[in-house]
Amino acid sequence: MTFPCRLYLFCRTALRLGLACAIGAALFGCASTSKMSKPLNDFSAITSDSTTVTTAVLTVVQSVDQESQAIELTREPPKSLKEGIVQPIFRPNDLLQRQLALQSLATYAATLKALATVDRSADIQKSFDSLKTSLDSSANTIAKLASGSTMQIPSGVVSGIVSLGSILAKAYALQEREKAIRAALETSDGTITRICNLLSSELRPGGAIYDQLKHDFNTQEEAADDKYQATRKPASETEAKAPAEAKPPPDLTPVFKSFAAIKTKKDYCLALLNSLAASYRQIAQVHTALKIQSETGVASSAQLRQLSAQIDNAKLLNAQISK
Amino acid sequence: MKTQTLIDPYFCLSEIADTLWDLYQSTEGKTADQARSMYDTLENLYLEPFRRKQIQANTEKYAALTQRLQSDITGINKDITRINKIADNIQKVAGYAAIFDQIISIAAKLVAI
């Protein structure tokens, strides 16, 4: 086979490749968005919401605990005021580390979302278009210089090769992105599960934060009961001694109102903590489901929907507490 | 071989405290006062100090886990930079091709002269 004949066959193959690439390009254009983009976007939104609600509720827990400590100190006043008599539920570092962990969870989910939405296909295409123009121009210049040569580069060869390069580069970038998502979900799954389990173990009934908050509200209810007894007692004693000269019964409405407010806040706060504990258990499960989805393609949408509903409940309860 | 069940003392004491609180809520007079007094003693002497220690112990765990998660986040950010670099490198190649084309054009003009 002579050299011009070989060149002709090469050019024909390149043209066919160019055509295949053009079809491929159209297909790749549709698939440049990661299949993990939507679930990771939802996961990020849910994690951000849970971080906001939990951070707010930790502050409520701290303030309720401070009020209850004041009640306990009033019941049995110390001889003098020393720093040691105040034992807060959260020391500054206790609260800070929990808030940092929550913030890290939200940042992690947001970074994963950013990774899933990295799409430079348009930039790659633009660069290849520019490359094509330059190569076409160079090929023309060379063709003009070697006008007598039998080794002319047929038209369409450059564009075919460039289209192929463009497709390969875009496919490589997309493949690297999917690989990075898989690796990130795989690497962090253990840490996410441990953080979520730790949060859940503190916020569920029987957990340290839940039980402490319940006891703090119980202390406030006891104080309200004491106040009620004290308000009622003098009136009853006077009635017993001199029924004719008895003063009108004291107005107990503020005491009842205050007691009802404590009871309502207690119910909402404990329900919120329980709801958040369930949410964190589910966040860990959803993360594992996302990891499986990135490996096998099995959708995690059902778990995400369930988690989203759970977070909506928590937001609703938090809104009631903030009122 | 006999199987031994582990009993969690905190769980047992919490159950007793809950029962005492329920008794205080559902009774009046001396019984209620006694239930409340026992509940307060149990909570203030045993359960509350235990819970505070538990919270402080967990703080160390949170710190270690947060550090690990932060390093994972750094890894993901590096991946984002690496993927973006693919497009940047192609852009550089396109730039070099444009320079090459200009050189070829100048060379062609020089040859023509």
Image (cartoon, coloured by chain):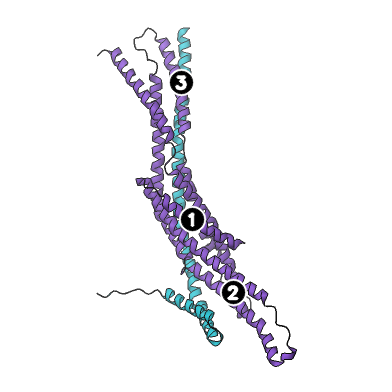
Q: Tag 1's secondary structure?
A: helix
Identify the mark at residue A309; answer none if there is no mark.
Answer: 1
- Identify the mark nearer the N-term, 3 or 2: 3
Identify the mark at residue A134; answer none if there is no mark.
Answer: 3
Residue farthest along the bottom direction in this orientation: A241
Question: Which amino acid, mark 1?
Answer: Ala
User: Which tint is chain B?
Assistant: cyan
Q: Position of residue B81 (x, y in %)?
A: 46, 40
Image quarter hosting the C terminus of chain A:
bottom right
Q: Is residue A112 above or below residue A255?
A: above
Q: For label 1, count other residues whose C-alpha is less than 10 Å away and answer few (under 14), some (14-19) or many (20+).
A: some
The chain containing the residue under callout 3 comes to A
Q: Tag 2's secondary structure?
A: helix
- Provide the residue designation for mark 2: A220
User: Which tint is chain A?
Assistant: purple
Image quarter hosting the N terminus of chain A:
top left
Q: Nearer the viewer, mark 3 or mark 1?
A: 1
Q: Is residue A106 above or below residue A32?
A: below
Spatial CA distance of label 3 from label 2 is 79 Å
The chain containing the residue under callout 2 comes to A
Q: Tag 3's secondary structure?
A: helix
